[in-house]
Amino acid sequence: MFRRIIFLLLIVLFAASIPTSVSSAPANPLLQLSTLLFGAPMFDRIKDSDYLPAFDVAMAQHLREIQAIANNPAKPTFENTLVAMEKSGQLLTRVGNTFFAVSQANTNPTLQHVQEVEAPKFAAHSDAIYLNPKLFARVKSVHARLSSLHLDPESAQLVRVYYTNFVKAGAQLSAADQSKLRSLNQQLSILRTTFTRKLLAGTKAGALVLDNASQLSGLSDAAVAAAAQAATARGLAGKWLIPLQNTTQQPALQQLNDRSVRQQLFEHSITRTEKGDENDTRSTIAAIAQLRETKAHLLGYPTYAAYSLTDAMAKTPANVQRFLTAMIPAARAKVAADAAELQAAMKADGQSGTIEPWDWQHYAEQVRKSKYNLDDNEVRPYFEINNVLTNGLLFAATQLYGITFKERHDIPVYNPDVRVFQVFDKDGSALALMYFDFFKRDNKDGGAWMASFVGESKLLGTKPVVYNVENFTKAPAGQPTLLTAGDVGGMFHEFGHALHGMFAAGRYPSISGTNTSRDYVEFPSQFNEHWSSYPSILKHYAFHYKTGEPMPQALIEKMNAASSFNKSYPLGEQLAADELDMAWHLLPAGSPKQDVDQFETQALARSHTDFPAVPPRYRSSYFAHIWGGGYAAGYYAYMWSEMLDDDAYQWFVQHGGLTRANGQRFRDMILSRGHSEDLAQLFRTFYGKDPEVGPLLKERGLPPAP
Ligand SMILES: [Zn+2]
């Protein structure tokens, strides 16, 4: 995952940071020049109480800078408008980048309070910029003269990105329409909060409570104990409680032996927000869909999907539809073949009837065990964390890109577990600073992500200071931390984002490094995952932590074989969710409020993603990405990025695999380029043609598309 600053319209403002000194509050280290390498945050001096006053000073300063640009009596030029905006807000960027790092990875009540206080201020701050008519008039004037200005391609791209951001925010509407837009945004924001609240409550209430220990047969002792504890915590001592996860599928379905218990758990999952009670989200989401149609229409787009995709690599809903449609026949055939195999396993287990969604993972796990006989505990001794880091992750980057790393113990960190490396370029010059925060903590968000303390920009003279956050389980003191294969993949993934940030060589902060689109940003990260299992890399880091023996070839082969098993379920559920998301956001303005159940059934049937036994990863009523998060008409982005990374990896395979020359080419054409050019063009230049779905289908174990 890649973390943008959560207030979307502020992406531009938070793109880079540079030390700035402010004389009004000299005691606050956030308002002073960092004396550290590359402007790294001075965590040895920053106190939690510094953030609130720093935000106030930084926001006021940024607004003054913006006013000065908007009110400039001189004719609008690229320099006095666009470049001036790129130079504005540096103090706010620095405060924000530092704050969001600690509030997500090392929070506490003080930081949580700052977040609550600042959130509405950010929304107002964003409006003050993007709905400033004088400022937009200047941007529009430069944009209108773009072809006669003879700007270099990167500068021209900057103009287009700014113009699109302003238009998407409603800058070109009349004052009356802007007030309509504000009202729509406000209603949408209230409905989104309502959806999130209902979903949270519905998911909590949807937990499955069991009365007899026998019903938990199949779960590990630890899982049974956790279920007993969860029941006690809700005042149900003596019972067992299985809480719901976000997705339709529930992890416990894999282990639970009792078919009727599995069915109950599954039904709790899919009806969590469809019970007709106060947690039912269906009328809320139908209202959101309708308001989005109205908003898109007001902004001059035929559908919300068209509005949302204007600045994506895919560009149009038709391109997304074509991409998804190309995979569906192969996915349908593979789902049917896998279902038949699992059906046979179910019959052999003495169960009659058809394989259902609540049976799938259970029998897949049985087949996986009998067919591949792979135990996670067999693999982990070969994945000691320091070995994976130094001899795997960093070694691969040296092989591909020629860069080297030196751990620094003198750079202050926000938690003693955080490690810092200085990164040197192939000629020995200093390139970047890289922080790793590996271990799970109670005060850290779940998941894994990359972000920057300082973004690269030639205009501002900044070098990248980037970080990766993971949630690996830390071994007790004195014992080695042994990773799972999934952890190793995650480490390579996040480091792929970090390379995208570290190799950035752009002039303008807001289109440098990872500041790209949602359907492109996961491309470098997923691409980097391929190297974790590349033979010469794996051989270099997978050594038994006790004996030093290399991982046996038989185990490597077993791992590879097992990883290609049961790929149709995740593909099918993802395609179905992609199609649902697109269907909701392709409703034209003026459509009546939809009946959610009927709409979903028809949308899945129409797109042929009504796979038997493989329901959508999220059904409409609990699809938080599209109703509560920022993924409306954007859930496809995960798979689109996967197409790009599989295409790029195939290019490597066809051109000699892992070589310095290939790495350099990828760095020059992709990793260093940020959003300095149209993203589809960047990709085309590297790949030699437009992206194609074939390599993705192959990686997913499917035959080529017809
Ligand atoms: Zn990612």
Image (cartoon, grey):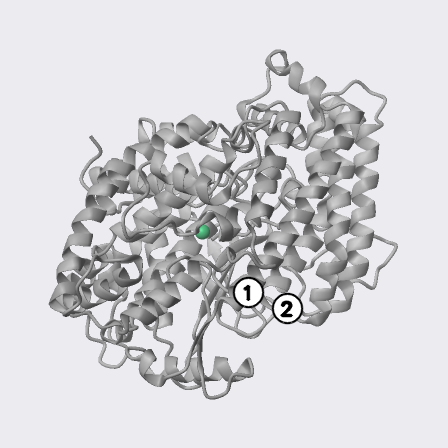
Point out the residue furthest to the bottom here: 238
- Up the image or down, 152 lies above or below 502; here it is above
Front position in the image: 261 or 643: 261
Instruction: Indicate yes or no: mark 2 CB to ligand 1 under 8 Å.
Output: no
Question: For the point 34% across and 38% down, which residue is it?
Answer: 605
Q: Is residue 488 left or right of residue 678?
A: left
Q: Residues within 10 Å of mark 1 (few under 14, many from 20)?
A: some
Q: Quadrant of residue 374?
A: bottom left
- Mark 1: secondary structure: loop
- Which mark is drawn over residue 445? 1
Residue with the mark numbered 2: 107
Q: CB atoms at circles 1 and 2 under 8 Å apart?
A: yes
Question: For the point 26% across and 72% down, which residue is it?
Answer: 376
For badge 2, the amino acid type reads Thr
Q: How many marks?
A: 2
For badge 1, the amino acid type reads Asp
- Up the image or down, 459 lies above or below 356; here it is above
Front position in the image: 250 or 522: 250
